[in-house]
Image: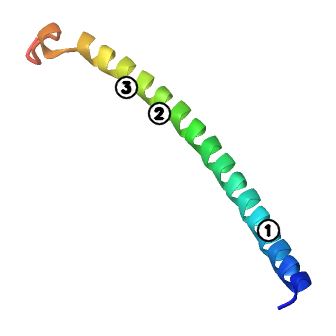
Amino acid sequence: MSSEDRIIEIEMKLSHQEHLVDELNRTVYHQQQKIDELEMLLGALAKRFKELANASDDRAPANERPPHY
């Protein structure tokens, strides 16, 4: 194998690796966007859950009239 062939092979491998790194970067970027979205939704759900829990505390059986009244 000539030195020129070796250089061409190295350049091809480097090009392939650069493509893979770019692809991985895009994947990580999209995953981070999805994580951010899911964290925002989780926060909203947690807030809503607390609101519902507080509302149900106000209507606890100790605070309600018995059904026969």
- Whether residues under marks 1 and 2 lie with C-beta atoms below 8 angstroms apart, the answer is no
Q: What label sits on residue 6 in the rendered view?
A: none
Residue shown at 70%/52% (left/top)? Answer: 25
Dot 3 or dot 2, earlier in sequence: 2
Q: Dot 3 corresponds to which residue?
A: 49
In the rendered image, residue 36, in percent from the top left (x then y), is placed at 59, 36
Q: x%, y% of residue 11?
A: 85, 72
Residue at point 14%, 16% (across, down): 61
Q: Secondary structure at mark 3?
A: helix
Which residue position holds label 1?
14
Question: Viewer-nearest of labels 3 and 1?
Answer: 1
Report the amino acid beneath label 3. Phe
- Quadrant in which the C terminus appears: top left
- Compared to residue 68, the image places residue 31 above or below, namely below
Q: Amino acid at mark 2?
A: Leu
Tag 2 residue: 42
Mark in the foreground, 3 or 2: 2
Nearer to the camera, 36 or 11? 11
Horizontal side of residue 31 vs 46, given as left or right: right
Crowding near the residue tagged with mark 2, few <14, some 14–19, many ≥20 C-alpha atoms within 10 Å: few
- Residue at 43% from the left image edge and 22% from the top image edge: 47
User: How packed is label 1: few (under 14 Cα within 10 Å), some, or many (20 or more)?
Assistant: few
Give the position of the N terminus as an image quadrant. bottom right
Separation of residues labelled 1 and 2 (CA atoms) = 41 Å
Q: Amino acid at mark 1?
A: Leu
Foreground of the two, 7 or 33: 7
- The span from disc 3 to disc 1 (Cα, nearest Å) is 51 Å
Q: What is the CA distance from the residue labelled 3 to the residue labelled 2?
A: 10 Å
**Residue at the image point whose x is 66% and y is 55% from the top:** 27
